[in-house]
Image: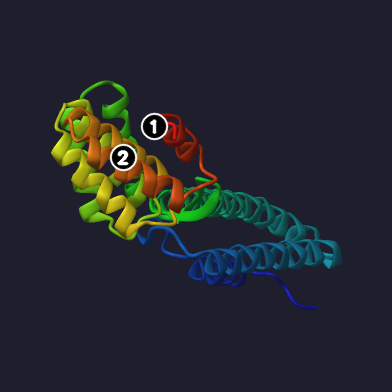
């Protein structure tokens, strides 16, 4: 029958501790490595426990049994230390997984802020970049606040920076209105002409022509006003702007 000497037990324990990861200075393990280390430690602890208990149960000699019991107590203390290390490693793994999850949640949120968003502009769906949306909203807010000079500057900058934007026609239209609000009719007419020429299919085109007619009236240019109103009725006959134009035209 084999005896479980102190030397043999020490060697077994040294073999277990030799497999432990250099925890104090190694930093966090990756998930797979940490799981393997935990499983390996648990396996070695269970093996040592089974071996010691089996040897105690099969020893007939009382002196050897008492010696084994003392060794068993020491082994149990060592096992408790190993279990503590396992628990610490498991907690470390859980914390690492939580940090990784939080990182990806934050990254996803940041990426979503940079992604184009679908918006409805005059009945049509269009993809708009966040920076583009913010610039347009800020310029329009200045117009609504009555700061027409700043609004004109911001809207002009917008159409130059985003000439292909789904908001470009609207921005150009409001640019004309910002000039008109400052009583700069020549600049207003020029801005609205860009709407008609560049964005003829925009719902704002008919309104741009009506605003042009108002500017010509302000400039005492009756011929220009009538010509613009006639063109509006002919080009956009079903628009609300065309209906307003008909009411302004002299009755025949």
- Front residue of 166/97: it is 166
In the drawing, what numbered circle is on residue 89? none
Q: Position of residue 71 (x, y in %)?
A: 65, 57
Q: Few, some or many C-alpha atoms within 10 Å of disc 2 (few <14, some 14-19, many ≥20)?
A: some
User: Is 8 placed above or below 28 here?
Assistant: below
Residue nearer the viewer, 144 or 208: 208
Disc nearer the start of the sequence (1/2):
2
Task: Name which residue lies at 42% across and 36% down.
Answer: 245
Residue at image location 31% in from the left, 40% down from the top: 226
Residue 226: which numbered mark, if any? 2
Quick one: quadrant of the C terminus? top left
- Percent x, y of residue 191: 22, 46
> How far across and how far down the image is residue 211, in percent?
31, 36
Q: Is residue 191 visible?
A: yes
Determine the image quadrant of residue 148.
top left
Q: Position of residue 97 (x, y in %)?
A: 53, 54
User: Which residue sits at x=22%, y=35%?
Assistant: 216
Q: CA distance from mark 1 to mark 2?
A: 9 Å
Residue furthest to the front in view is: 252
Horizontal arrangement in the rendering, residue 146 relative to residue 238 (left or right): left
Q: Which mark is residue 250?
A: 1
Residue 203 appears in the rendering: no
**In terms of secondary structure, where does tag 1 sit?**
loop
Q: Are marks 1 and 2 in contact (CB under 8 Å)?
A: yes
């Amino acid at each position: 029958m084999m005896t479980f000497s102190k030397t043999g037990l020490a060697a077994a324990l040294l073999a277990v501790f030799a497999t432990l990861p250099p925890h104090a200075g190694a930093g966090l393990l990756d998930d797979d490595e940490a799981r393997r280390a935990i499983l390996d430690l648990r396996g070695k602890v269970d093996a040592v426990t089974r071996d010691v208990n089996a040897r105690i149960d099969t020893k007939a000699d009382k002196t050897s049994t008492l010696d084994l019991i003392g060794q068993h107590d020491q082994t149990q203390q060592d096992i408790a230390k190993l279990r503590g290390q396992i628990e610490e490693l498991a907690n470390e793994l859980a914390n690492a997984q939580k940090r990784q999850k939080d990182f990806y949640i934050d990254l996803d949120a940041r990426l979503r802020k940079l992604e184009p968003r679908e918006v409805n502009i005059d009945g049509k769906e269009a993809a708009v970049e966040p920076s583009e949306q913010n610039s347009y909203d800020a310029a329009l807010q200045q117009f609504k606040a009555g700061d027409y000079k700043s609004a004109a500057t911001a809207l002009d900058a917008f159409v130059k920076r985003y000439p292909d934007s789904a908001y470009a026609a609207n921005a150009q239209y409001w640019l004309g209105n910002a000039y008109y609000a400052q009583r700069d009719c020549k600049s207003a007419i020029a801005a609205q002409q860009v709407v008609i020429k560049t964005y003829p299919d925009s719902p704002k085109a008919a309104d741009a022509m009506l605003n042009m007619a108002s500017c010509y009236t302000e400039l005492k240019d009756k011929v220009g006003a009538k010509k613009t109103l006639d063109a509006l009725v002919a080009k956009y006959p079903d628009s609300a702007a065309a209906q307003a134009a008909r009411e302004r035209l002299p009755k025949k």
